[in-house]
Image (tube, rainbow, N blue to C red):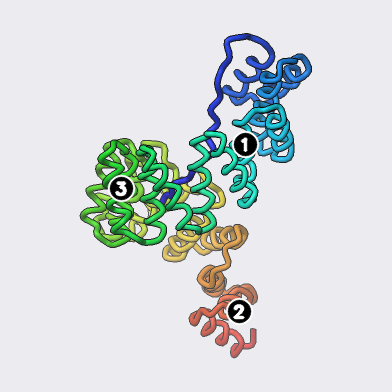
């Protein structure tokens, strides 16, 4: 399920004059940070006016922040603050937030709020949320709502959802929808989904899909898959793929796999691997398909890939051991079945003990 992520949104204002400062700012807007840095460093050298110099430091900070050069970014924002730029507090807080230095971030965002930066409330709420300080986060979002910020309903609903306070979350998301927040349909669907109210969840996800929410497609497909409505699930994931969701290949493969449509499942899982060669689930399912088809060489390749990608589940080692056993490669079978047995797999233990008794 997707989560609401509160990000530090960089809102950059333009000045009427043209110069290195403005050119650097234009490069930031185009995500050309190397060029932006060059022009902003020139601006620092040429600017004598305090406000413009402060802006040059601030935008340099933004340039470094966008590249995750946090130490350099911090220096620039501190300089901007020194030159009187109050907005730099917000960006400085964003650095500490990104580094999970929550105590520092909290202090700075509180300073930003004192200086009238309303968007810092959201970041402060996010910090409390991430630290599971839910009471403090709730206070922040309630304060925003009291101040007429209707966007905060969505975040307050997510907070209640995280705490499994589903009745409260439902009320808040309904309120968010009432105020025109279309994204809340997805989150309302997720609440019903979590409570296994699948008919209601389906309605909300369909509404979210109508409003262009691609994540709702995946969530709805999972409901259909869980309910055994494979035709509907297939339609949903085919649509998701058309919309550019490459993760949907994995889900579509699952639908075909459950129905023993192995050729189709194989195609989908191979597609999933093409899009992400670390897709452990796709490798594992391909291994299972090849085992069922007695294609042991292919199964071996897939299961070894699962292990190479760091997946250490007992079933992987057990299946690989059984693949070697089926090919009479008993030393390799013994090696992997032993690991599977040590991880608690009963089948692995039975075959491992059998090999021991046979003298391998």
Q: Residue furthest bottom?
A: 357
Q: Earlier in the sequence, mark 2 or mark 3?
A: 3
Residue 157 drawn above or below residue 80: below
Q: Quadrant of the C terminus?
A: bottom right
In the rendering, at what x and y percent does residue 164 appear?
Answer: 37, 61
* Camera-nearest label, 2 or 3: 3
Please give the residue where the numbered disc 1 appears in the rendered image: 89
Q: Give the SS element for disc 2.
A: helix
* Mark sitting earlier along the chain (3/1): 1
Can you give x and y, in whole percent of width and height, for residue 268 in the image? Answer: 41, 48
Task: Tell me the quarter of the picture where residue 111 sits.
Answer: top right
C-alpha separation, residue under disc 3 versus residue under disc 1: 31 Å
The reply to whether residue 248 is in sight is: no
Question: Relative to 134, does residue 274 appear above or below in the rendering?
Answer: above
Nearer to me, 164 or 32: 164
**Does residue 261 lie above or below 208 as drawn?**
below
Q: Which residue is mark 2?
A: 338
Instruction: Tell me if label 2 and label 3 are in contact, CB under 8 Å.
Output: no
Q: Residue at x 26, y 37 (%)?
A: 210
Alpha carbon of mark 2 to alpha carbon of mark 3: how far?
51 Å
Q: Secondary structure at mark 3?
A: helix
Q: Secondary structure at mark 1?
A: helix
Which of the numbered marks, if any, corresponds to residue 173?
Answer: 3
Q: Earlier in the sequence, mark 2 or mark 1?
A: 1
**Residue at left offset 63%, top offset 24%:** 32
**Label 2 Cα neighbours within 10 Å, binned few <14 / some 14-19 / many ≥20:** many
Query: Are the two marked residues, 2 and 1, in contact with CB atoms closer than 8 angstroms?
Result: no
């Amino acid at each position: 399920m997707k989560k609401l992520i509160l990000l530090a949104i960089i809102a950059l204002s333009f000045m009427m004059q043209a110069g290195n400062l403005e050119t650097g700012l234009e490069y930031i807007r185009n995500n050309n940070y190397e060029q932006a840095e060059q022009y902003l460093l020139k601006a620092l050298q040429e600017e004598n006016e305090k406000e413009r110099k402060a802006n040059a430091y601030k935008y340099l900070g933004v340039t470094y922040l966008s590249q995750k050069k946090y130490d350099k970014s911090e220096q620039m924002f501190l300089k901007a603050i020194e030159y009187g730029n109050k907005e730099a507090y917000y960006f400085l807080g964003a650095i500490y937030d990104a580094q999970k230095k929550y105590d520092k971030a909290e202090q700075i965002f509180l300073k930003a709020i004192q200086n009238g930066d309303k968007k810092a409330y959201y970041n402060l709420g996010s910090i409390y949320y991430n630290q599971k300080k839910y009471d403090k986060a709730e206070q922040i979002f309630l304060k925003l709502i009291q101040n007429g910020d209707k966007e905060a309903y969505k975040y307050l609903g997510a907070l209640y959802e995280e705490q499994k306070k589903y009745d409260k979350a439902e009320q808040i998301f309904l309120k968010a929808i009432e105020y025109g927040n279309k994204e809340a349909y997805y989150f309302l669907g997720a609440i019903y989904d979590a409570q296994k109210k699948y008919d209601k969840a389906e309605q909300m996800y369909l509404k979210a899909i109508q409003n262009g929410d691609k994540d709702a497609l995946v969530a709805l497909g999972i409901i259909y898959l869980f309910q055994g409505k494979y035709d509907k699930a297939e339609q949903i994931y085919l649509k998701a793929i058309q919309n550019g969701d490459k993760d949907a290949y994995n889900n579509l493969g699952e639908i075909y796999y459950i129905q023993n449509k192995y050729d189709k499942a194989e195609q989908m899982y191979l597609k999933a691997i093409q899009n992400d060669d670390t897709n452990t689930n796709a490798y594992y399912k391909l291994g299972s398909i090849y085992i069922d088809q007695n294609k042991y060489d292919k199964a071996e390749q897939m299961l070894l890939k699962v292990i190479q990608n760091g997946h250490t589940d007992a079933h992987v080692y057990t299946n690989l051991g059984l693949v070697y056993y089926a090919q009479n490669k008993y030393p390799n079978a013994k090696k992997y079945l032993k690991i599977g047995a040590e991880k608690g797999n009963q089948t692995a233990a039975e075959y491992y003990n059998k090999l021991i008794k046979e003298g391998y």
